[in-house]
Image (spheres, grey):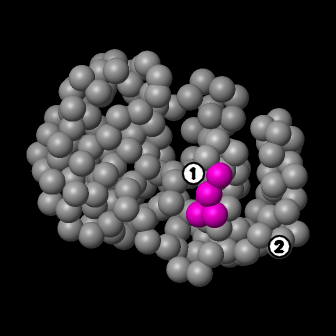
Amino acid sequence: MNERELLVDCLRRLNRTGVLYYLTGSMASNYWGIPRTTHDLDFVVQLPATALPLILQEFSENFHIDEAAVSAVYEPPHQFNAIDTRSALKVDFWLAGTEPFDREMLRRRVQVTLFGEPAWISTAEDVILHKLLWDRISPSDRQMGDAAGVIAVQAEELDKVYLRRWASELSITAELERLLRGEIKPKDT
């Protein structure tokens, strides 16, 4: 099973649960920007306790998923994963946050079709901002390269007022402006 097949499989499983989710991380930046190889999938999920059994049921076949880790998602680091036993690829699930930007990302998610499957995905602007936030937490050329790739592809379609407003609130204005000026280039894939 390759990354694309795993993504479709996970989307089908998540769609069956009825859980609010969106695709984020590298796969979201691949959709909006310049694709690169990735070895995991990242989903943000809004997960009431009543939905935990649904997630466990859907991901019980062909995945290693730890019930205790899923149940502990309400405690830091608010994350659990499922390992695909067919490919050893990892799927990370992040609990939707309660901070204003986290709530905004969930509210703004958009529905698209990925490889024939309906999918909820973070917007291009939110991918950029989230990549900048992650770069601040754990500096990485990949995060900045992904963000630059989204800007390169989306260019004039981006809502720069939204980007600048949230960059100011998140204290990442300098990084965003460097990206918008083209000072940071996308990585070669």
**Dot 1 amino acid type:** Ser
Instruction: Name the residue at 66% across, 26% down.
Output: 99
Between residue 158 and residue 76, name the one nearer to us.
Answer: 76
Residue 68 horizontal side relative to residue 134, left or right: left
Q: Secondary structure at mark 1?
A: loop
**Dot 2 amino acid type:** Gly
104 relative to 187, above or below: above
Q: Which image quarter holds the N terminus?
A: bottom left
Residue 121, horizontal then vertical, whole percent: 51, 53
Q: Quadrant of residue 171?
A: top right
Residue 182 horizontal side relative to residue 39, left or right: right
Furthest residue toward bottom: 188
Q: Which residues are magenta?
A: 139-143
Number of residue marks: 2
Disc 1 designates what residue? Answer: 122
Instruction: Name the residue at 62% across, 34% down.
Output: 102
Q: Secondary structure at mark 2?
A: loop
Q: Quadrant of residue 143?
A: bottom right
Query: Do the CB atoms of the residues marked 2 and 1 lie less than 8 Å apart?
Result: no
The mark that comes first in sequence, 2 or 1, is 1
Q: CA distance from mark 2 to mark 1?
A: 23 Å
Instruction: Name the residue at 62% across, 57% down.
Output: 140
- Residue 182 is marked as 2
